[in-house]
Amino acid sequence: MAGTALLDVTDGVATLTLNRPDALNALSVEMMQDLQACVRTLPGRDDVAVVVVTGAGDHFMAGGDLKDFATQLHLSPQARHAAFRAMIEQYINPTVVMLQQLRQPVVAKVRGACAGFGLSLMAGCDLAICADDAKFTTAYAAIALSGDGGASYFLSQILGRRKAAELLLLGDRFDSAEAERLGLVNRCVAGAALDVEVDKLVARLKRGPRRAYAEIKALLAAAPSNQLESQLQSEAEAFARCSASADFAEGVTAFLDKRKPGFTGA
């Protein structure tokens, strides 16, 4: 039987698919477990150049599965507190951290509903392209929840505290054009063109300098908590490491030869 999250690695691209299309890919406990199992296999894989996160069918993810949540309502408040905290700490948090720490660029391909943890997951990706039919909402406040999956972290980093507070406190729905205007997605394209546009982006990233990409990701991750002096030093060290790579030599030589570089990741 197929899992609720699937991982396929083909020709250097790892595609992570949320796989509950009949439920709009809503996040069940089983999906949390399957998603973590898939992501756990990615760190250290030299055969993967790019990771794509997407949803099966017509939607990315419509947030948490409220039917799953409802099975916990018979518990006492203290027991619910323990159950939900354990669930998030055991499955959600480690998965988000592992995705963030991947050396490879992670691209979200979004269509249809993108809500709750789905929005957190998309916001945590390095790049995101959505179809023009995509609809977004944090959704948490509507059921008296505060957010998970890095919602408060990623939204405040991308949007600033004021706009992040609006999205989380009010939970209003917004469309793909607004998501692009806010910078939550890099591009909004016609639904029929989504696969083609993501494939183009992935092909471009595959041809890129893998070591430099990893250094860029690490620098961006460290920047919010660093003082300027510390970040400058980190940049100097990363720059020096990149300059010692074969890809750097190839990049400079290709530029001077007026040709496209052939990066190898070395």
Image: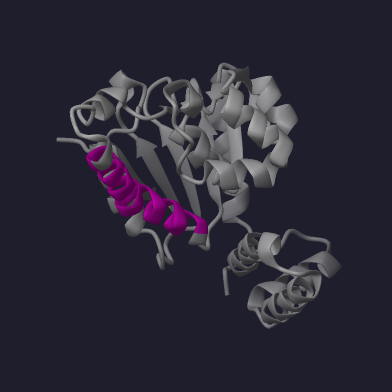
The residue depicted at 45 percent of the width and 57 percent of the height is: 97
**Residue 74 located within the stretch drawn in magenta:** no
Task: Give the quadrant of residue 98.
Answer: bottom left
Task: Return the residue nearer the eye: 57 or 118.
Answer: 118
Q: Would residue 34 be visible to someone looking at this image?
A: no
Q: Quadrant of the C terminus?
A: bottom right
| Residue that extends furthest to the left in the rendered view of this protein | 1
Report the side of 95 relative to 86 (left or right): right
Q: Quadrant of the N terminus?
A: top left
* Spot occupied by residue 73 in the image (x, y as percentages of width and height): 23, 27
Over which residues does the magenta segment extend?
79-100
Residue 220 is at least partly visible in this image: yes
Rendering coords of residue 263 (x, y %): 63, 66
Look at the picture and state if 104 lies above or below 64. Answer: below
Q: Nearer the viewer, residue 147 or 251?
A: 147
Q: Using residue 8 as the reference point, say whether residue 201 is left or right of it.
A: right
Give the main secondary structure, helix, strand or loop, of the magenta stretch. helix
The x, y position of residue 213, in whole percent, is 63, 62
Q: Residue at x 79, y 74 (%)?
A: 232
Q: Quadrant of residue 54?
A: top left
Please tell me which residue is depicted at 31% across the width and 27% down the height of the picture. 65
Residue 217 sits above or below residue 11 on the image: below
The image shows residue 259, relative to residue 157, as above or below, that is: below
x 44%, y 31%: residue: 145
Magenta span contains residue 90:
yes
